[in-house]
Amino acid sequence: MSLQASVIMLGVKDVERAKKFYAEGLGCEIDQDFPGFVRCSLGEGSSKLALYEWEAAAQDAGVSAEGSGFRGVSFHFIADSRDAVDEVMQAAEAAGGTVVKAAAAAEWGGYFGYFSDPDGHLWKVTTAT
């Protein structure tokens, strides 16, 4: 058996705010919506995205809820074109995210930028080449 990421869960401070950001702002389809927990579809062939109240997520894992700054994780979306990268970056910012690194050409020939969601989770939006 090989390891697969069926669902990626993000601990968030405000589930309703996160739901609005991902569903309304970035177009993710909600497939479960409960108080304190939402699960979204990221599209065919992708993992699901779960949004869970920060404290409850920490308690579920049996760890401290304290923590800030870079968490050692970023999510990557490979877009079909530079225009698609720009479109996702603009949608994220319009939905309440923060552009932390504006999209620009990379020395390796691609094009990418970073945004963070309202809870500081980093997303890299990039072209493959």
Image (cartoon, rainbow, N blue to C red):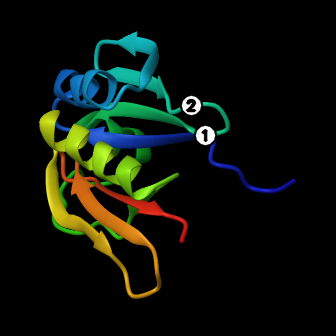
In the foreground, 71 or 101: 101
Q: Can the viewer see residue 62 in this picture?
A: no
Disc ID at residue 46: 1
Q: How far from the left and from the top, in percent, is residue 82?
A: 39, 58
Cβ atoms under marks 1 and 2 closer than 8 Å: yes
Tell me if residue 56 comes above or below residue 37 in the rendering: below
x, y percentage for residue 69?
Answer: 17, 67
The type of residue carrying mark 1 is Ser
Where is mark 2, residue-wise?
Answer: 43
Place of residue 64 in the rendered image (x, y in percent of width and height, measured from the top left): 26, 54
Residue 71 appearing in the image: yes
Q: Secondary structure at mark 2?
A: loop
Q: Residues within 10 Å of mark 1 (few under 14, many from 20)?
A: few
Which residue corresponds to the image point at 54% horizontal and 71% vertical from the top-left?
129
Residue found at x 87% / y 53%:
1
Locate residue 2: give its quadrant: bottom right
